[in-house]
Amino acid sequence: MQFRAGLLYIALFAVVAAGAYGVIGAAESPEVTVDPADADYQLEPGQEFQLNDRTYNATDVGADSGSIEYVNESAILETEWSDGDTVELEDGTEYDVMIDGGNETDGGNETDGGNETDGGNETDGGNETASASSFVLVESFSEDEYETVERDGEQYIVVSEGGDEVLVPLLEFEGLETQTYELGDTIAYNDSDAGRIIEGNITDISSDTVTIEYVGESSTTYDLTDGEVATIGNQEFGVDFPEEGTVYLTSDVESFETQQEEITHFNERIRGLWWVIAIAVTTIVLLAALAYMPVRG
């Protein structure tokens, strides 16, 4: 009796597992798609399109991913030079950047009133540290050309005069060309990375860096993935790759996300059926073991 009852339940759970597996095999997963008529943009590789008065380019369109690029040809860009950097100006001459904010003393130690009880020793101003308002470009040179030494943080050129060695401050040495720049000045230099001459304005000078602002080209890339929502500029689009080399963009994100929710719901049901199969198979194994257990008496 125990054996026959076990076989009956085993058959029942086998039917349940087979039914769940059959449903999984027959079920078709929904897909997120965009009807060509509903697509705001149908793009191929290299195709340009207008969005909010900007021109974008579909630089890469694959089977299920791609990218959109926007190039701003009049972007405000910045570059920084640090104290000691070597730069090349538009005439091809290389210069070393020298920035010296210096210490500005206003008033020093001022005594008013001698040793009087009222007034005593009065100090007005003290030592103030002023930020740099200018910097100097010094023509670059090698150690083979000139010998240099440093004294109290200042560089000197060693010059021979009448058999004696004389130290001439670097900025006063006539053998090297120097150029002084201040805030707001215009400067043109060679950008080796961009491969062109850049003309910019000096917008900031700190104790160890110089900031130059200029108009240049800046690009922004937006990645596209099939079935997902992408933000291009400030606008959201549903993305669909119907075939390799073609991408549809739709601004109807609400219906696009509804399709995504349907896919999520479908996957949840499929996972539930796999759990049914797993539980049914586990139960079958357990029932088979119990059915073959010997009965006392």
Image (cartoon, rainbow, N blue to C red):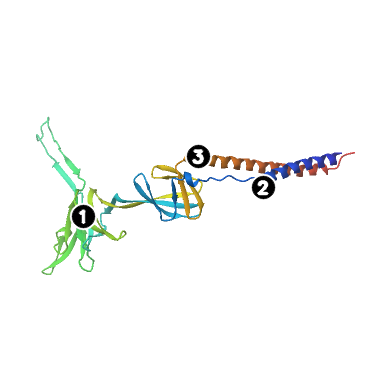
Q: Are marks 2 and 1 in contact (CB under 8 Å)?
A: no
Q: Is residue 233 above or below residue 150?
A: above
Please provide percent x and percent y for residue 33: 52, 46
At 34% from the left and 45% from the top, the residue drawn is: 53
Q: CA distance from mark 3 to mark 1?
A: 54 Å
Furthest-left residue in view?
Answer: 113
Identified by mark 1, the residue type is Ile
Nearer to us in this view, 38 or 140? 38
Q: Secondary structure at mark 2?
A: helix
Nearer to us in this view, 295 or 64? 64
| Residue that carries the numbered disc 2 in the rendered image | 25
Tell me the tag on residue 255. Answer: 3
Please provide percent x and percent y for residue 275: 67, 42
Q: Quadrant of the N terminus?
A: top right
Q: Are marks 2 and 3 in contact (CB under 8 Å)?
A: no
Query: Who comes first in sequence, dot 2 or dot 3?
Result: 2
Q: Secondary structure at mark 3?
A: helix
Query: Who comes first in sequence, dot 3 or dot 1?
Result: 1
At 23% from the left and 52% from the top, the residue drawn is: 200
Q: Is residue 1 above or below residue 85?
A: above
Disc 3 vs disc 1: which is toward the camera?
Answer: 3
Disc 2 vs disc 3: which is toward the camera?
Answer: 3
Identified by mark 2, the residue type is Gly
Nearer to us in this view, 232 or 106? 232
Corner quadrant of residue 45: bottom left
What count of labels does the image hold? 3
Please provide percent x and percent y for residue 15: 75, 43
Identified by mark 3, the residue type is Ser
Corner quadrant of residue 141: bottom left
Question: Label 1: how many residues lie within 10 Å, few (<14), some (14-19) or many (20+)?
Answer: some
Tell me the tag on residue 15. Answer: none
| Residue that carries the numbered disc 1 in the rendered image | 187
